[in-house]
Image (cartoon, rainbow, N blue to C red):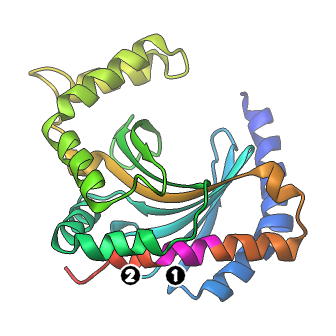
Amino acid sequence: MNEYEKRLLTERSERFVDGKIKPLYKVLRDGLGYQMSRIGYDDRDFNYVHLAFFDTPAEEKDTFLNIFIGKRNVQIITNTEYPSSIGAFYQNMKDDPEGFDALVAALPPDRRFSSRLYTKIPLGPVGWHEYYFQLVFKYSLGQTSAASIMKRIDGVRTGFDKAIRKGLTTMEIDPRYGEDTTAYYKSFYQGRNAKKTPEPDAFMALRFEYLIPLSDILSLDQDAVTAELMQCAEQLRPFIAFGNRQK
């Protein structure tokens, strides 16, 4: 994409956000009542708009709510993706597995719900916004439990070298990543001379989410869309509170 094309896409995206997303965002912000929130969009490929809602001043360093509006789906998710927040969520499940399992059991049956763990490896210097995401597991509502999630987090912690090697293998054969990104990844994470020894908790993202096809959303009017997103967000809220229990 050249600079002219990018400018046109930026202008179109900003008009879309101003005309369609900001009114929805305002209703959700006022209705959900989180302490802080913000709105943004993918400024590289313009593939999604994201809304973020935070219950704590630490924002992303704790568990928070994201709503991603993409070209194919709408995702309503809890995001736990910093070392301290992954560690806190894990410890809270370890201390109170019955409490976590009760949250899961309280959710109504819904095939759109899943719990997911990813490895999330930066593809550039600190502050860069590109990552290599690798799915570790995707569990349905019936498969989600404190024990099943902790077991998989333990597996990532003890076998993170495998995740690093798998990521490099994928990037070397996938042209989307390019030579520069692959070379950065290899020099930064691989081998005895690697510039950084990854701390597994710093490279994980734990999510509980509802995934709604965009075609289902487009068939609804504005009020019905808002109600659907609000309902999913409220059903996930206990998971945010669980992750942000006093450390």
Q: From the viewer's perspective, tell me whether residue 204 is left or right of residue 140.
A: left
Residue shown at the point (74%, 82%) measured from the top left = 27
Q: Answer whether residue 233 is magenta in the image.
A: yes
The quadrant holding residue 190 is top left
Kind of residue sitting beneath label 2: Pro
Q: Is residue 199 at all visible to an observer of this figure? A: no
Residue that numbered label 1 is attached to: 36
Question: What whole-number distance in Å separates the C-alpha atoms at marks 2 and 1?
Answer: 8 Å
Which of the two discs, 2 and 1, labels the residue nearer the N terminus? 1
Was residue 90 drawn as part of the magenta stretch in this picture? no
Could you classify mark 1 by the number of other residues whose Cα lies within 10 Å: few (under 14), some (14-19), or many (20 or more)? few
Q: Residue at x 58, y 88 (%)?
A: 33
Residue 119 rendering spot, x and y as whole percentages: 34, 41
Label 2, on which residue?
Answer: 57
Q: Position of residue 60 (x, y in %)?
A: 40, 66
Amino acid type assigned to the residue bearing label 1 in the image? Met
State the residue at coordinates (85%, 77%): 223
Q: Nearer the viewer, residue 87 or 176?
A: 87
The magenta segment is: 232-237
Q: Is residue 210 above or below residue 37?
A: above
Whether residue 29 sits left or right of residue 98 in the image: it is right
Residue 147 occupies which quadrant of the picture? bottom left
Camera-nearest residue between 94 and 199: 94
Q: Within 10 angstroms of label 2, few (less than 14), some, or many (20 or more) residues? A: few
Q: Position of residue 2 (x, y in %)?
A: 73, 28
Q: Is residue 225 visible?
A: yes
Across and down, in percent, residue 17 comes to 78, 62
Q: Quadrant of the N terminus?
A: top right
In this picture, residue 13 sits left or right of residue 39 = right
In the image, 171 versus 211, the foreground residue is: 211
Tag 2–tag 1 contact (CB < 8 Å): yes
